[in-house]
Image (tube, rainbow, N blue to C red):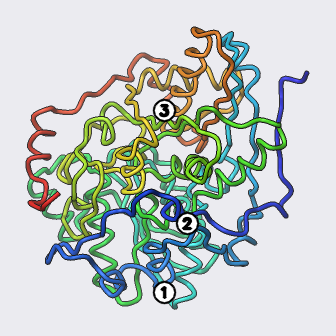
Amino acid sequence: MSDTVKYVLDESRIPKAWYNLVADLPRPPEPVLHPGTHQPIGPGDLAPLFPMALIQQEVSAERYIEIPGPVRDVYRQWRPSPLYRARRLERALDTPARIYYKYEGVSPAGSHKPNTAVPQAFYNKEEGVRRLATETGAGQWGSALAYAGAVFGLQVDVFMVKVSFQQKPYRKALMETWGARCVASPSTETNAGRQILAQFPESNGSLGIAISEAVEVAAQRDDTKYALGSVLNHVLMHQTIIGEEAIAQLEMADDYPDIVVGCTGGGSNFAGIAFPFIGAELRGGRKVSVVACEPAACPSLTRGKYAYDFGDTGHLTPLVKMHTLGSTFIPPGFHAGGLRYHGMAPLVSLTQELGLIQSRAYTQTKCFEAGVQFARTEGILPAPEANHAVRGAIDEALRCKAEGVSRAILFNLCGHGHFDMQAYMDYFAGKLEDRAYDEAALAESLAGLPDLAA
């Protein structure tokens, strides 16, 4: 049999609706709270930041939300994305496991992020918005929103975490090619940025700081809304197109996963691959073991507290209940910049609380080791973020080998690493260090969580 086994759906099989896990959970998520009153917020509280269509999706309990025709038309540029059987990797590992990966690096931006950037830009354009403000870590989300802004004629301002801004200059160039403006965060353009710089002049930045800057800009301009690339319910919902396609492709392979693996930072690509399978299980389908793989230097699921917290460092956002390291936590400057976020999506956090998923934390050198092995067997160079999922899938495959059991493993290869070559150069030169966070700083950050009843 050929080493290359690829399962491709015709574009007519692009899902017509996104899946909403809330409809099948045994209990609803905790309410989102107003940052000032600590009372549950209503749609009007979110209107300065988001168009009403997205607000309605954020609070929806409907199982399926129809994908607008213009969004599906744009999706056709790269969707359905391919599913591969990793036979060369299986052979290299000498494992009886059957390894499948869903490859999202075929999108224009090279990652899964356009799956939500396109609908967010569409809904904002429909409401008459002219400008979007956002944050980005490694640059995948900023690139995706820049692309979506170009498609729908919106100006996009991106606050990029400073350490990634410096590490990944080609991401900035890509955003600018699509017409976006990219600024290193913390910046001098906002009150939130100036306050951080006054206290920490050499700050590397964090996603929490960049969110504060983008939210501040959106809240102050009538023609501007805020767009978020992860964490929120509607963002995770848009990404479920990944898992929905994977279910259909695995039917082509006459297989079904025993184990589903995804990397986690804010939770969007993980939710995208895992939620449709979790939902199927909750509706009486086959049980799946779902593994969330996060960086050991920013371990919100494995070390964070399940509590109400702000989504940003400047405390401008509503309070959500999630696994958090505290909104003031600033992780060290490791290369998987898209995973450097202090909190985990409330829905992903809830699935862990309900025992529907398990989580593991990995150091970056172990992840790069896995990414290099994957590239040398399967030919695709993963992004540093995706390497966490590769590491998790390889570990599961090796466990199958040790136990002498054949299981089907599915993971989401959420993006390619073509803009991350400096990280690989550092790895091969022995310069890539496993950066540890400061335990005292984590304790201080957790001690500063909002004083709310659990």
Question: Residue at the right extreme?
Answer: 1
Precedes in sequence: disc 3 or disc 2: 2
Residue linked to disc 2 = 117
Please state the horizontal and vertical placement of residue 350, each as a whole percent of the image: 37, 52
Q: Residue at x 47, y 57 (%)?
A: 25
Residue type of the residue flagged with mark 3: His
Q: Earlier in the sequence, mark 1 or mark 3?
A: 1
Q: Amino acid at mark 1?
A: Val
Quadrant in the rendering for residue 226: bottom left
Q: Classify residue 249 by image quadrant.
A: top right
Q: Which residue is mark 3?
A: 388
Instruction: Indicate the quadrant where residue 345 lies.
Output: bottom left
Question: Of the residues tagged 1 and 3, which is closer to the observer?
Answer: 3
Percent from the top left, x then y, of residue 24? 52, 60
Q: Measure the C-alpha gap from mark 2 to mark 1.
A: 15 Å
Question: 203 left or right of 353?
Answer: left
Q: Position of residue 42 (x, y in %)?
A: 32, 83
Q: Which residue is mark 1?
A: 129
Q: CA distance from mark 3 to mark 2?
A: 23 Å
Residue 271 spot, x, y in % from top left: 52, 51
Q: Earlier in the sequence, mark 2 or mark 1?
A: 2
Q: Is residue 78 left or right of residue 415?
A: right
Q: Residue at x 31, y 35 (%)?
A: 302
**In the depicted view, which residue is nearer to us: 176 or 362?**
362
Q: Which amino acid, by three-letter code, is at mark 2?
A: Ala
